[in-house]
Amino acid sequence: MNDRPFEAAAFAAPAAVDRLQRTALLAGIAGLAVCLVGAFLSPDYFFRSWLVGWVYWVGISAGSLAIMMLHHMTRGAWGLVIRRVLEAAARTLPLLLIAAVPLLFGMRRIYLWARPEVVAHDKLLQAKQAYLNVPGYFIRMVIYFAVWSLFAFVLSRLSWRQDAQADPGLMRRMQLIAGPGIVAYGLMVTLAAVDWLMSLEPHWYSTIYGIYLLGSQALTTLAFLITFALWLSRRPPMDKVIGPGHFHDWGKLFLAFTMLWAYFNFSQFLIIWSGNQPEEIVWYLHRITGGWGYVALGLVVFHFGLPFALLLSRDLKRSASRLVWVAGLMALMRLVDLFWQVEPAYVGETGTQNPAFYWMYLAAPVAIGGFWLWWFLGQLKRHPLLPVNDPYLAEAITHE
């Protein structure tokens, strides 16, 4: 521990944040305009692509909250120097709750269980109707975001208090809150995975699907974290704070969650395929037959195989300029993975085989992401980029 004092003003956000914020807002407006055109041309594709983009960015916000709480539980330089970034990303959760509003108008187009004429002739859906219904869907969503946001804002406020007073007890308070927060996060993600994605094919189920989404959120968050940390590390004041040792630690976390994602993904596949039950294997049949098999192969190679092989290198993990390429690849493959989970659920429905509207799966993430980044940067620049009175900050800056 080091009692060296730091000045909050010395760690104000660089002026480049304002320029990036304006660019993000323009990208969000342009993406939204394209989405509105797509909604007029093909409402089905609009709502499905909006779901994909929305889940993608929720993953970064909720994942940032989880990694922030993991840092509070374990401490360490890897999380301290980027804690304000994680806090700002977690505080975007209310914005994403608002961004879920379009889904309300597309429930019948997205989910079979939201169509009364289908439920009326399906006994299994009737049995699940007590859980799978539109009011319950949105009530649970509000609960998820309320719980996540509560932990995000409470931990942020305690962190801001460190800027005003050097109270070592604040660290302990944040740690005590983070423990139950991690448990609550895991429970909410498990239920959200059922609501948002697994119920796209309501006759299918998997007890491992929730932890699969949890690992996916961690990967998306780390990809964003590494990319943004590189951007910060090339500008003062963070150019003298973030070093190879920090990127090395993030790279090790990245490798761990890459293996976790692959482990749970393959475990789900192996258990279902070996059981060979018709009601279980249909989910994979939709996603490995025809052209979808090439997408699945691409996920195996570029979502796991190549990143895993590259992240084994210590030198690569310590080189921010090389590690960011792996992060960029993972960010793209996370979007491909969500596309692969969502779109095959509609195989056979009228008008869903036309690939001309697949571009909306890019437009929607850009639209939501532009507004998300604009809001995130606004939150980030409100406070110093480092918790200046944290007693371990000096050690974290010199971490190797």
Image: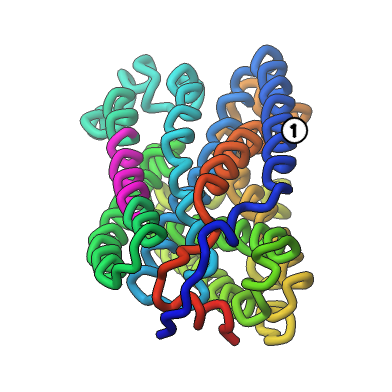
Tell whether 210 sits left or right of 374.
Answer: left
The quadrant in which the N terminus is found is bottom left
In percent of width and height, residue 223 lies at 62, 60
- Residue 155 found in image quarter: bottom left
Q: Image point 32% across, 56% down: which residue?
A: 158
Highlighted magenta segment, given as a residue range: 142-155
Q: Image point 47% across, 25% down: which residue?
A: 103
Is label 1 in a helix, a strand or a loop? loop
**Depicted 124 relative to depicted 77: above or below:** above
Q: Nearer the viewer, residue 313 or 156?
A: 156
Question: Which residue position is annotated with label 1?
Answer: 359
**Depicted 134 relative to depicted 208: above or below:** above
Q: Nearer the viewer, residue 321 or 116?
A: 321
Res. 156 in view: yes
Q: Image point 70% across, 62% down: which residue?
A: 236
Q: Is residue 298 magenta?
A: no
Q: Is residue 145 magenta?
A: yes
Q: Nearer the viewer, residue 290 or 97?
A: 97
Q: Nearer the viewer, residue 11 or 134?
A: 11
Q: Please tell me how crowded label 1 is: few (under 14), some (14-19), or many (20+) other residues with Cα within 10 Å.
A: some
In percent of width and height, residue 310 lies at 72, 78
Q: Image point 69% across, 25% down: which residue?
A: 29
**Depicted 22 relative to depicted 291: above or below:** above
In percent of width and height, residue 173 lies at 24, 64
In percent of width and height, residue 204 lies at 40, 45
Res. 297 in view: no
The amino acid beneath tag 1 is Trp
